[in-house]
Each structure stands twice: as structure tokens, then as C-alpha cells.
Image (cartoon, helix red, strand yellow):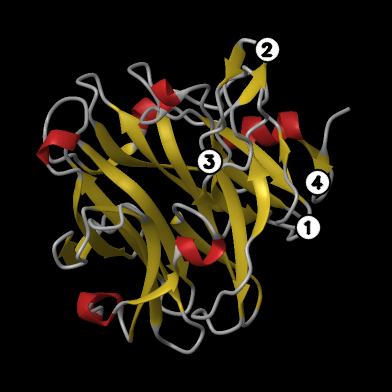
Amino acid sequence: MLHRYGDGMDTTTLLQTLAFDPTAGTVIRTPPGTGYGYWVGGHKVSFDPASGLFVLFARSRTPLEHGRGGTCEIAVSEDGITFDTVWTATKEQLAASSIEVGHVVPDGSGGWRFYVSYERPAQRDWRIDVLEAPHPEAFDAQHRRTVLQPQQFGLSFIKDPWVIEREPGVVDLFAAVPARRGPRVAGDIVTIADDDATVVTTSTDGRIFRELTYVFEGTGDDSWHGHRGRLDSLFPTKDGAGWVGFHSGGRTMYDNYEEPPGVVVSDDARSFTRVTPDAPFVMSPHGCVRYLWGVPVGDDLHIYYEYTREDRSHDLRVSVVPRP
């Protein structure tokens, strides 16, 4: 039986609506070098109807032996295609060993909040900080404040934040955390643990988050998405009756940097149904298409994604499809 959502569109029609050719997407950022380990992405994009601005966060990454996630940027656009950089930071300015995913969002009162995850050198843990400013170009790295520290929840990391508002004044922050399912032992056979899971935490001021709820985890089997449970995106359907999102999959650590994407649907932004269980939703001919992030604007959906190029580096692209 096909899952139906919103105005009754089934998931077959949904996947046809979302389908795009990643090779034909518009390249909006190129990696800092050539070859495996040079990537630009880790991105999130917001659209602010009040100002008409698209606001992009992206980080640039070099191979492990050359410094990892060393720089990040915030850029703005009026069309969601051409972005102008208005703010940058290095890992040194964040006192970090590597920068990961960040998300810049309107704060509801004319200003902006910037949630960013990074790894601290001494503790070797990933945490999430927030910066606040009247405009995306005005953030000051020195004024960041930690909002989610993993040790407070008994975790080794919490990272890759992104935010939605299901209702005015209520912030839902989703993040990646360690999986709850560890290695399974049956006699002399040990089966690998899951890599990660997704939690959500809610706040009324965007600063204080006290509880985490697990909402998405790996399936634990040998499928293409069996050992990764990271939600990357969630957006409301055009009729407002449901939610559609993208997630990352993986079978083992071999897939850690080439994570294929899938599609999920939800009625409440808390429980999710995978609708691409048999195969990834889209792939590059040279590797993966990852970190799919959907931004609905009117009747269109902008999909931003990392794309594996022929030389195995990743660039950042956007494709525009009809909004489901």
C-alpha cells in the first residue's frame, strides 16, 4: 500500500515530482582542491519571505592530512542560485579542529541566528553553538554561545544542526548524535553498530534546549541505509498537510564520506516513513549526491546538494523542481 499524504498524492508521484538530474544542476560553490577529501558543502539554506533573501551556510574541507573543515561562509542571494559571500570564519576563529554543518535562520523579530557545529581540539567532541546578529553579515565568532554540549546528555557528539518552525515562536532543532544500537554479538559473530541517529530538541527562545528525543535511526539491516540514521532536511508540502524530507544512508564506515540519500514523509515531523527503501533516491555517476536540502519557495523547491565530481572532490549544486 502506498503512503499518501497531503492532498492524496502517493509516494510514486512524489518521487516523480522530486526527481532531478544532478549532473545538470547549477554549481554554486567549488571545492578548494582537486581529488578525494576536497569538498564544499555541509550546507543549509534558509529563505526569508520578509526580506526575500536566501541565506546559505557552507563549509570548505580539505583532506584529513591537510586540515579537514578549515573555513566556512555565509552567503546571500535573491534568486537562490547566485550567492554573494557576506561573512567567513576559520576553524581558528571558532577554536575548532574542524567545522561541520551550520544553519542561519531568521529569529522571528527581524534578526538572525546562526547555529554551527564544530569539533573542539582538546575534548575531540562535536558541539553546537549559536551566534546572533541583526543581519547575516554581522555575526561575530567571538560572541558564540554553546547551546548543545554532548556530555550534558551523556553523548560523545552532537552535530549537524538544522532548524524548522512548526508553529510561530517554537524552534525545533534537529541534530546528529551517536546511534543507540551498538554492535550485536551472536556466538562468535559480531555485527557492526549503526553510525548515527537523529534527535530533535525544542525551544521557545532558540537558546535553551533541555531535552533530546530520538526520531530517526538506522534500520540495522544490510540495506543501503541500514547503518545510518541522519535526517538532512524537512519541509512542508504545498498544501501544508504533511512533511517531506531527505536522509542519508550507509551500510558501513566505507560509506562515511559518500553517503547516498533517500526520501522520507511524515505527518507530524516526529515519525518518519522511508519511501526509497530499495535504492538511493539519486546518485552521481562518480559517487554520491549527499546532504540534500530542500527549500520551498512558492510552487518551486530548490534542492541543494554536494555532488561527487569525476576527480572525487565534491562541489555544491542546486536544482529546482516543482514543490510537492
Closest to the camera, between mark 3 and mark 4, is: 3
For the question of whether residue 284 can be seen, the reply is: yes
**Cα–Cα span, label 1 and label 4:** 7 Å
**First in residue order: circle 2 vs circle 1:** 2
Residue with the mark numbered 4: 5
Between the C-alphas of marks 4 and 2, the distance is 44 Å
- Count how many numbered circles sit on residues in the image: 4
According to the picture, the residue beneath numbered tag 3 turns out to be 196
Across and down, in percent, residue 199 comes to 60, 55
Q: Which residue is mark 2?
A: 187
Q: CA distance from mark 3 to mark 4?
A: 27 Å
Tell me residue 179's x, y (percent): 57, 41
Quarter holding residue 286: top left
The quadrant holding residue 194 is top right
The amino acid pointed to by label 2 is Gly
- Mark 2 in CB contact with mark 1 (< 8 angstroms): no
Give how far apart the Cα atoms at labels 2 and 1 are.
48 Å
Residue with the most extreme top position: 188
